[in-house]
Image (cartoon, coloured by chain):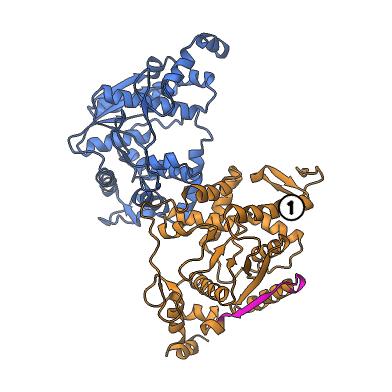
Chain colours: A blue, B orange
Amino acid sequence: MKCIVCKKEAVIKLPSHHSAFCVEHFLQFFLRRVDKAIRRYRMFHANAKILVAVSGGKDSLVLWSSLLELGYDASGIFINLGIEPNSDIAEDKVKQFAKENNAQLHIVDVKDYLGATIPEVNKIVKKPICSVCGMVRRYILNSEAKRLGYSVLATGHNLDDEAATLLGNTLHWYEGYLKRQYPTLGEEQGFVRKVKPLVLCSEKETLAYAVIRQIDFDSERCPFSRGATSQFYKHILNLIEHDMPGTKQNFLCEFFRKMSGNIYNSSEKDKLTPCEICGYPTSAGKKCSFCRLKEQIGGETYMSLLEKVV
Amino acid sequence: MKCIVCKKEAVIKLPSHHSAFCVEHFLQFFLRRVDKAIRRYRMFHANAKILVAVSGGKDSLVLWSSLLELGYDASGIFINLGIEPNSDIAEDKVKQFAKENNAQLHIVDVKDYLGATIPEVNKIVKKPICSVCGMVRRYILNSEAKRLGYSVLATGHNLDDEAATLLGNTLHWYEGYLKRQYPTLGEEQGFVRKVKPLVLCSEKETLAYAVIRQIDFDSERCPFSRGATSQFYKHILNLIEHDMPGTKQNFLCEFFRKMSGNIYNSSEKDKLTPCEICGYPTSAGKKCSFCRLKEQIGGETYMSLLEKVV
């Protein structure tokens, strides 16, 4: 197997691109894919002030690394979720990366924001913790990006993540989610601009980039994520991809090209109003989901609930 | 496992309906599903003159059987494709069914219509034979339904068939096909009204109905259909269904409910014009695909081509 650029021995084969690359040309290929996504989906300009949401996992650190490599002004933000020992290990990896790359890093403790760690929330709240945790993280990232004056918030969702989400949204035809599934969501109604520059890079490619660049990422899976449906959808898409290479990327990119924002005759946006407590845009009523969660865990019964569960 | 209606021993378990049935209540359930599809998708009225496209396989004979059982005026039409020995075996089964049920049957020979059998076409034409054969059958069925004065043409596509087609159309976001995927297509521009009354009945349910009713169907698979992608998509959907019972039906029915005919802002119909030879509506140019195929296999080189291949 030879590199299709220089004919040296290849280190990675990419059937969906009918390609194989040596180390040097894979890195070039990967950065070009990131650059292509940034341009194709009009994510940001060369002088944008970008905040990268970093979890310590491979995707977000690869995103940060590649944005810095491409010459962007990219700082990181890490939310310590209070999941022991994972969160502290991840925080150390992120700090180390920032130091080595001489990049600015902001650290937020979920307990300072919410009054409880994610494991504590999990014991108090009956809803699936992954969706609650996702809501909390989106809230904190948006609030911090605005507070710190960043023009764009970048997350490390890769091609496999987005295709799995699209498969789930499509199997159930979740209209609202399909309407909002796009690699760039412009600033609107209190939301900062959000982008996913790894959307054209597969999980395999992202992992290969991390390994080749010797990025010391946190490979522990979140203890709460077992049996997540996103893993099942990824598995299904990998079965399809095995028989029909390129289908995963085609599924996602053709959706963006043909369908996104063009699905419904009644293409009205969801009506959002500012939360009466914090001002965050919400469709959930007078108070946003974050403030309601905060009330629930910080209310009169908070201590008694904690006593029950600790 | 007990029948959910009468608590007798059940013969079939249907996880997607959280149900199990004895023989009697399964037949009742099945016919209600057919009736529900006819009503939900406004397929036809009680006195419609229905032509059922029968191949001799389980789905089309079950469709014919259930329409007769529900009291509809349903005749059959069988196209002998000239695939030896399959086509003659299938024709015998269809004739037998018609005789036993005292129902009217029309038989058409593809060679009379086209000038060649499907195996002969396969040797002459370079395109995938399944798509050519589908085009030929749709052409003949439409033409015969109109010529014989039927108001509606019914085909035996079941839930699994339609969900597999939808998955394929969705994975590639084939706009034109998605736009036309609906269980009822009204009469328009030279096309007879087309309906799929088994669209709410799964493959398993249809097979069970055939077995219980002792319908002597042709279980041979077409020799040309090996490795068909529809089989692959069915396999994928069955894997999903196994983990998430009900997803297959939800995927299809929610598509019909939310998306169908509502997908595109530019919801213009494909522009069809009558074929200059036969008058059949076509988007393929001046001549329709059927007449072009007929020319190709019946032209000057027809005999020489046949001599080469026979």
Residue A252: x and y in percent read 39, 48
The region drawn magenta spans: B99-110
Residue B114: x and y in percent read 51, 82
Q: Is residue B68 above or below residue A278?
A: below
**Which quadrant does the N terminus of chain A fall into?**
bottom left
| Left or right: residue A150 compared with residue B34 | left
Q: Amino acid at mark 1?
A: Gln
Q: Is residue A285 visible?
A: yes
Residue occupied by mark 1: B28
Residue occupying the far left of the picture: A47
Residue B125: x and y in percent read 45, 78
Q: Residues within 10 Å of mark 1 (few under 14, many from 20)?
A: few
Is A7 in front, or is A192?
A192
Q: Residue at x 39, y 23 (%)?
A: A89
Q: Is residue B107 magenta?
A: yes
Q: Is residue A288 above or below residue A166?
A: above
Q: Residue at x 61, y 59 (%)?
A: B197
